[in-house]
Every structure is written in structure tokens, then in C-alpha cells.
């Protein structure tokens, strides 16, 4: 049965996260006193895990090839950053 899990993202650049296969990265936001970037995903915990890669880019940064799934944006005032998943297929 699907559930929602939360995973920490890095503060920029690439972040690899182990998630159950088929997980759907659904939302990003800042959380906690340190305003840490987090990603929430709909997962089936019983499934085997796979490594997924995400990247945070600032507004105005060029989007490298392969960042072809936009997840969402986070807003640590006064900045805005954008989270993409790197899809391998």
C-alpha cells in the first residue's frame, strides 16, 4: 500500500536518494529551523530500492541536459531554487 515518505535534499548541486522503485517524487519544501530542503514522495515501502538523482538550481542558472522532470520550487527568502530529477531513461 502506498505511503508518503520524506527525504532530505542537499543544499545545491546533485543529491542521490535511495527510494523504493517506482516512487513518485511529488513535492518539495523547506522544513525545520534550518529551513532544510526536503522532498516528499509517494512510495511502496515493500519494493526494492533504487538510487534516484535530484538537482537544485537557482533562478537564472542554465538547466543541464538530462534534468527533464521538474519537481517544484523552494523559496528561502529572498531566493528561489528549483528542484529537478535527473532521469536516466
Image: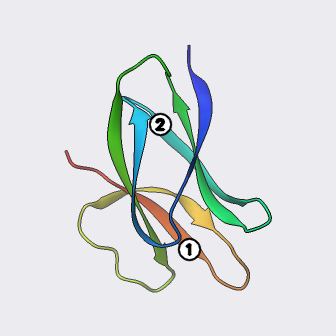
Q: Position of residue 8 (x, y in %)?
A: 57, 53
Residue at point 32%, 58% (across, down): 68
Q: Quadrant of the N terminus?
A: top right
Q: How many marks?
A: 2
Side of 76 where 63 appears, left or right:
left
Distance, label 2 to label 1, CA atoms, is 20 Å
Residue at point 51%, 82% (across, down): 59
Q: Position of residue 17 (x, y in %)?
A: 42, 47
Instruction: Classify 10 Å Cα crowding around label 2: few (below 14), some (14-19), many (20 and above).
Output: some
Side of 32 where 14 appears, left or right:
left
Residue 28, label in figure: none
Q: Earlier in the sequence, mark 2 or mark 1?
A: 2
Residue 24, label in figure: 2
Secondary structure at numbered mark 1: strand
Marks 2,1: beta carbons within 8 A: no
**Image quadrant assignment for residue 81:** bottom right
- Against 50, residue 13 (above or below) is below
Q: Relative to the observer, which residue lies in front, 4 or 50? A: 50
Residue lying furthest top: 1
- Against 53, residue 26 (above or below) is above
Amino acid at each position: 500500500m502506498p505511503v508518503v515518505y520524506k527525504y532530505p535534499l542537499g543544499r545545491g548541486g546533485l543529491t542521490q536518494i535511495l527510494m523504493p522503485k517506482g516512487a513518485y517524487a511529488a513535492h518539495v519544501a523547506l522544513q525545520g529551523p534550518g529551513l532544510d530542503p526536503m522532498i516528499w514522495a509517494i512510495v511502496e515501502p515493500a519494493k526494492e530500492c533504487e538510487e534516484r538523482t535530484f538537482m537544485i538550481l537557482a533562478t537564472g542558472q542554465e538547466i543541464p541536459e538530462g534534468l527533464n522532470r521538474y519537481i517544484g520550487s523552494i523559496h528561502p527568502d529572498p531566493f528561489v531554487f528549483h528542484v529537478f530529477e535527473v532521469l536516466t531513461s
